[in-house]
Image (cartoon, rainbow, N blue to C red):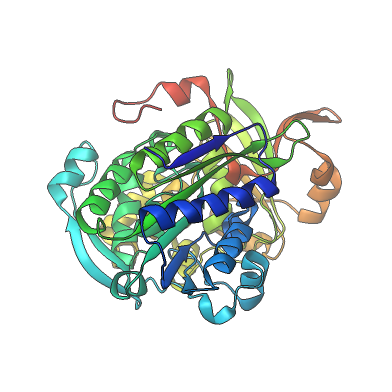
Amino acid sequence: MPWFTEVAEEIPFSRLVELMERTVEEARSRICRRPKRVLLLPPDITRAHSGAGPLTEILYNHFAKEAQVHLIPTLGQHVPHTEEENRRMFGQVPQERIHAHDWRAGVKYVGEVPAEYVREKTHGAADWAFPVWLNRMLMEEPWDLIIHIGHVVPHEVLGFANHNKNYFIGLAGKELICASHMAAACCGIENNLGTLITPVRACFNKAEEDFLGHLPDVYIQLVMARNPEGRLVHTGVYVGDDLETYLGAARQSRQQNITVFEQPVPKIVCVMQGDEFFSTWVANKAIYRTRMAIADGGELLILAPGLKRFGEQPEVDALIRKYGYRGTARIMEAYRQNTDLQDLAHGAAHLIHGSSEGRFTIRYAPGHMSREEIESVGFAYADLDTMWKHYHPDRLREGWQEIGNERFYFIPTPSAGLWSTREKLYNRPAGFET
């Protein structure tokens, strides 16, 4: 059971501060009365809209009076923050206390989820082990208290983001990231989205039970939704150290963050914020979260003023430029024949997730990439300035809109939800029920 929960139509920041203080007192009572070494595990800047950064700063300031407090943003293989991004995300937390996760050289092997277990949980879609490599600082240094702070929202690999995803993606090594992402792709992105416990999450749950039971950790799980004025606000806080803490938050997210359509949508226009999303690796959340709603022959227009590259790492960027977003069949054929895709299997999974499989047009309006670059990977192109002046997204709220003779559905923050037809959301294979 969670230590405590709070659910409201809108939880103001002043109340969030009080809930952080309550978390501290509960942790002192349940885990360590006077911690001397505290580790905070917040999201990276691609989740800045969650408000997890200011809450992390509050926790840091509380414990820094008496303990060594360190932060590791749970980057996975995303690009590490600049000092300016750290300041924007975490305020006045000293730079020397913020550590960049290194998914290649900064990890150690702790065990594996056996291939037989993976095969069972994925219903045969994947038949390889998950080698568990985790952040060396997390696993080797002594901690009296570890606090996760994160946003629970529909997710393409794990059904819903956060909880032990912080460990097994956010602080994982290349081998685990590759194995898990490819397994998720084989299970099918549209089966994963909005499922409480996907096959990959079931494997992560086993890994947490087998290898991390000794860690003195607690999860702060945040849920957000749009208020009547269209602002994204906090509506739920779940604090605890067990799976039910995650499940409670995921159930609330399922109710508040999934928009269900009775009929497929011909056109969706969305914005990926320019101060959060710099690559298609992260901006493609616009595709993931809307693909179950878009009609065959329809269009997704992504306004991405910050977009300047494809991958988060140079080698993944090169992989995307080489193979493009060409659909499952072509990528799987290339995967079987090419060692570069096999070596970066999470990249192959990303290429599968980012394709419409020929069902609808994906059109990017990027801030810092050329038409030639966008079209070379299989997307359609639009000029950002032209589209911005036509749609004026800063004036729109989520929902159906009409400009001239064009009717479309507008989404200001695709990464904060999931949009689907009723048929696609509820008519899914056994093992992927919402």
Question: How far across and how far down the image is residue 273, in percent?
Answer: 69, 54
Question: Residue drawn at (24%, 40%), measured in percent from left and top?
Answer: 122
Question: How far across and how far down the image is residue 155, in percent?
Answer: 47, 43
Quadrant of res 62: bottom right
Quadrant of res 121: top left
Residue 18 falls left or right of residue 431:
right
Quadrant of res 414: top right
Residue sitting nearer the eye, 238 or 229? 238
Q: Is residue 69 above or below residue 291?
A: below
Residue 210 falls left or right of residue 89:
left
Image quarter of the C terminus: top left
Q: How many marks?
A: 0
Q: Residue furthest bottom?
A: 96
Question: How far across and how far down the image is residue 304, in percent?
Answer: 68, 54
Q: Is residue 182 above or below residue 72?
A: above
Residue sitting nearer the eye, 276 or 269? 276
Question: Residue drawn at (32%, 73%), measured in percent from left and top?
Answer: 142
Question: How far across and how far down the image is residue 217, in percent?
Answer: 37, 57
Q: Is residue 123 visible?
A: yes
Q: Is residue 144 above or below residue 333?
A: below
Q: Residue furthest top?
A: 262
Question: Residue drawn at (58%, 30%), measured in percent from left and top?
Answer: 256
Image quarter of the N terminus: top left
Q: Is residue 295 visible?
A: no
Residue 10 falls left or right of residue 312:
right
Question: Residue drawn at (20%, 46%), measured in percent from left and top?
Answer: 118
